[in-house]
């Protein structure tokens, strides 16, 4: 296995001050760092992206630095509020900016919802599938006020699930990152073959 630390990008898909999504992702980032991973928090409230326009997005000045950050990530922790059973528009807009970059990488879903966020979670899993990304076989869902209070996790069950998720991100994220790199460098006809640099 590579000695490089697993690099995790965490995307905050809520623009709300006092967001439960942000609070859980910040706690996740702290735990991932403590476990030896490196992290990059993209908070779309402080780093807003223009609405995705295929004609202009890839030439936009902000595009190259963000693409470099996305390219560096082995794992994406994607946090969204449940809005009408869907993911938030800022997170969808972020996802629309990339496709090629997500292939072979691991998506991990975290949804703030009053109703377990199953439909929003499924939408993130659909995006992963369309982009040839992996997903963990479960996600986290939590509710503001009951599970998260004053920017901190207040429910021990959520804290335990987050600890489980951080462990699984570290272990499965590392395995998938190692295999992704091997497949990019290899010659076998797996799905990553089409992402190999052309000579
Ligand atoms: C426009 C809007 C639509 C919402 N739709 C739903 C919904 O369909 N189901 C649900 O459980 N909660 C819904 N909520 C509640 C949010 O999911 C909940 O407040 C969540 O904690 C917000 O995430 P945040 O704290 O990270 O901002 C909605 C909230 C807003 C503002």
Image (tube, rainbow, N blue to C red):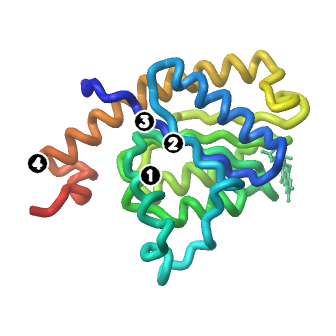
Q: Is mark 2 within 8 Å of ligand 1?
A: no
Disc 1 marks which residue? 70
The residue at the point 40 percent across, 40 percent down is 74
Question: Can you see residue 121?
Answer: no
- Is disc 4 in contact with disc 1, using a CB cutoff of under 8 Å? no
Question: Which element carries disc 2, helix, strand or loop?
Answer: strand
Left or right of 152: which side holds 40? left
Question: Which element carries disc 1, helix, strand or loop?
Answer: helix
Quadrant into which the C terminus falls: bottom left
Disc 4 marks which residue? 187
Residue 20 position within the rendered picture, expressed as x and y whole percent measured from the top left = 79, 38
> For the residues marked 4 and 2, what is the alpha-carbon distance in whole angstroms?
29 Å
Residue 9 position within the rendered picture, expressed as x and y whole percent measured from the top left = 51, 42
> For the residues marked 3 and 2, what is the alpha-carbon distance in whole angstroms?
7 Å
Mark 4 is surrounded, within 10 Å at the Cα level, by few (under 14), some (14 to 19) or many (20 or more) other residues, namely few
- Is disc 1 in contact with disc 2, using a CB cutoff of under 8 Å? yes
């Amino acid at each position: 296995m590579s000695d490089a630390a697993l690099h995790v990008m965490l995307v905050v898909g809520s623009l709300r001050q006092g967001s439960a999504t942000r609070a859980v992702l910040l706690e996740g980032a702290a735990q991932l760092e403590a476990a030896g991973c490196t992290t990059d928090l993209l908070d779309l409230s402080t780093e807003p992206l223009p609405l995705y326009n295929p004609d202009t997005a890839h030439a936009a000045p902000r595009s190259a630095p963000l693409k470099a950050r996305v390219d560096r990530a082995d794992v994406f922790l994607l946090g969204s509020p449940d809005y009408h059973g869907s993911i938030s528009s800022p997170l969808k807009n972020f996802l629309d900016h990339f496709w090629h970059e997500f292939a072979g990488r691991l998506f991990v879903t975290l949804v703030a919802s009053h109703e377990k966020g199953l439909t929003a979670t499924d939408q993130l899993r659909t995006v992963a599938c369309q982009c040839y990304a992996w997903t963990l076989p479960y996600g986290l869902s939590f509710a503001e006020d009951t599970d998260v209070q004053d920017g901190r996790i207040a429910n021990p069950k959520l804290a335990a699930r987050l600890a489980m998720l951080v462990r699984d991100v570290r272990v499965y994220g590392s395995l998938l990152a190692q295999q992704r790199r091997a497949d990019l460098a290899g010659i076998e006809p797996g799905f990553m073959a089409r992402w190999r640099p052309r000579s």
